[in-house]
């Protein structure tokens, strides 16, 4: 799986690069992740860095303290999901199984109790918790498909997992605007 740690930043940089005929500049020595792995520069300038960073915009409805509490969790989750994508695309079944189980094992936020106020759980819309449960189930489905070495099941299960991610991101950004795919 260590080989994936080097592929992910490069693939992520390519995915986030603006369409241009101008080649991307090489990453500077300061462009590294917390693990020390290089990050692709993708031609981002100071003004476009937020747009091309691969990060979600800040939701206006969520207080900054709650955003900060969620950010480490979301960053970690995003890194694992990028590695999972690479393992799925490169048919690395053992890595796919391991990473999908890692997604499923991520600690969950508890649903708020009756009358609970002032906690991050109380701030989040109920749909978030439904999607959190769905994510776990779908991550297990990816791991099960990888364990079975069934490429057709892997790609379908990964697609459903990605649907859960996009739905949750939509709720995070606009909690009153429910994003449902056909069949949800």
Image (cartoon, rainbow, N blue to C red):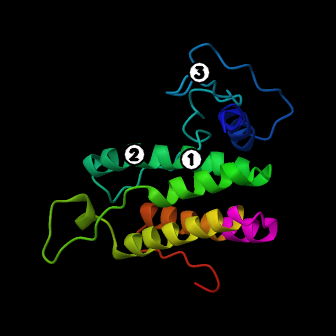
First-in-chain label (1 vs 2)? 2
Q: Give above or below for 97 relative to 117.
A: above
| Residue 22 belongs to the span the image colors magenta | no
How far, Cα to Cα, is label 1 from label 2? 14 Å
Magenta stretch, main secondary structure class: helix
Contact flag, marks 3 and 1 (Cβ < 8 Å):
no
Q: Residue at x 63, y 62 (%)?
A: 143
Q: Which residue is mark 2?
A: 71
Residue 80 tag number:
1
Label 3 CA crowd tier, 10 Å (few <14, some 14–19, many 20+): some
Q: Nearer the viewer, mark 1 or mark 2?
A: 1
Q: Which residues are magenta?
A: 147-159
Question: Which residue is situated farthest in the top direction here?
Answer: 29
In the image: residue 11, left or right of residue 74:
right
How far, Cα to Cα, is label 3 from label 1? 19 Å
Contact flag, marks 1 and 2 (Cβ < 8 Å):
no
Q: Which residue is mark 3?
A: 31
Estimate the x, y position of residue 49 in percent, counting from the top left: 58, 33
Q: Quadrant of the N terminus?
A: top right
Q: Residue at x 64, y 67 (%)?
A: 144
Estimate the x, y position of residue 107 in percent, counting from the top left: 37, 56
């Amino acid at each position: 799986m260590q080989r994936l740690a080097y592929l992910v930043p490069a693939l992520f940089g390519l995915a986030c690069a603006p369409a241009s005929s101008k080649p991307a500049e090489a990453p500077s020595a300061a462009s590294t992740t917390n693990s020390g792995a290089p990050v692709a520069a993708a031609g981002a300038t100071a003004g476009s860095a937020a747009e091309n960073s691969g990060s979600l915009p800040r939701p206006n409805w969520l207080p900054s303290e709650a955003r900060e509490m969620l950010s480490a969790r979301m960053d970690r989750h995003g890194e694992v999901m990028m590695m999972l994508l690479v393992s799925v695309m490169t048919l690395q079944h053992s890595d796919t199984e391991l990473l999908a189980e890692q997604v499923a094992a991520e600690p969950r936020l508890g649903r708020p109790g009756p009358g609970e106020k002032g906690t991050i759980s109380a701030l989040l819309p109920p749909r978030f918790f439904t999607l959190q449960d769905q994510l776990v189930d779908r991550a297990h489905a990816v791991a099960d498909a990888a364990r079975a070495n069934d490429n057709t099941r892997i790609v379908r299960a990964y697609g459903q997992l990605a649907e859960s991610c996009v739905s949750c991101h939509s709720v995070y950004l606009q909690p009153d605007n429910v994003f449902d795919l056909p069949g949800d």
